[in-house]
Image (cartoon, rainbow, N blue to C red):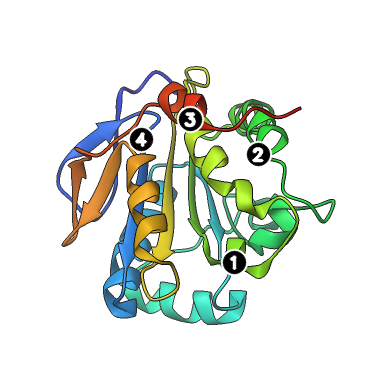
Amino acid sequence: MDTTKKTLSMGFTKEHFPVGTHMCLIYDNDEERKQIVSKYLAAGIEDDEQVRLFTDAVGEEEVRSWLQPMGVTLPAGPEGDGFRIFDPVHAYCPSGRFDPEAMVGGLMHRYEEAKRAGYTGVRSCGEMSWVLKGIPGSERFLEYEALLNKPRGNFPHIGMCQYDARLFDGATLFKVLQLHPFMIAHGQIISNPFYQRPEEFQAELPSRQ
């Protein structure tokens, strides 16, 4: 297993991007989103990555119903561990509260588990509309986005965060843009000119006593 790869395929573009790529998809067209997400997931599955989809707007059965017609061949490994769909509320808030530090702190452990299981990397894709449900701590989701930009070992991993522009206000979406080094526009990935480094974002946060 080669875990030293420097670039990875995103599936929906010809270009390859660096390990650790953290990008956002701000969308208002569901069909376009499905096309991008399907190709992104398929590329990870084809490359023997451990792929995780966190879906809030629709259930697992509906997601699978549009993934397969779009050419996504779902793996048939032990318990389907190569590809799994999660409810983000249960995944991100197992205690009923969202804790950004605890969530990000567990990432390296999960990467190591994936490496031991033989996967070439970890690929995640998550709908972020769950943060609008009033779950305690969910107001700190921007802190979580900033923490994801800190280097985390050398195991190949990439992430795509999905934001429905019909649900979030403009000011929030601009801040979301600032916290993603890469953004998806018209089906292409571009380096984000608005990107704000995590230390810059954290310096603006009020101190916690």
Label 3 sits on residue: 204
Label 4 sits on residue: 21
Labelled disc at residue 208: none
**SS label for mark 4:** loop
Amino acid type, mark 1: Leu
- The residue at the point 19 percent across, 37 percent down is 193
Amino acid type, mark 3: Glu
- Tag nearer the camera, 4 or 1: 1
Amino acid type, mark 2: Pro
The one nearer the camera, 173 or 114, is 173
Labelled disc at residue 100: 2
The Cα–Cα distance between marks 2 and 1, rounded to whole angstroms, is: 16 Å
The one nearer the camera, 66 or 199, is 199
The Cα–Cα distance between marks 4 and 1, rounded to whole angstroms, is: 25 Å
Check disc 2: other Cα within 10 Å, few if <14, some if 14-19, many if 20+: many
- Tag nearer the camera, 4 or 2: 2
- Tag nearer the camera, 1 or 3: 3
N-term-proximal mark, 1 vs 3: 1
N-term-proximal mark, 2 vs 1: 2
Check disc 4: other Cα within 10 Å, few if <14, some if 14-19, many if 20+: many
N-term-proximal mark, 4 vs 2: 4
**SS label for mark 2:** helix
Label 1 sits on residue: 132
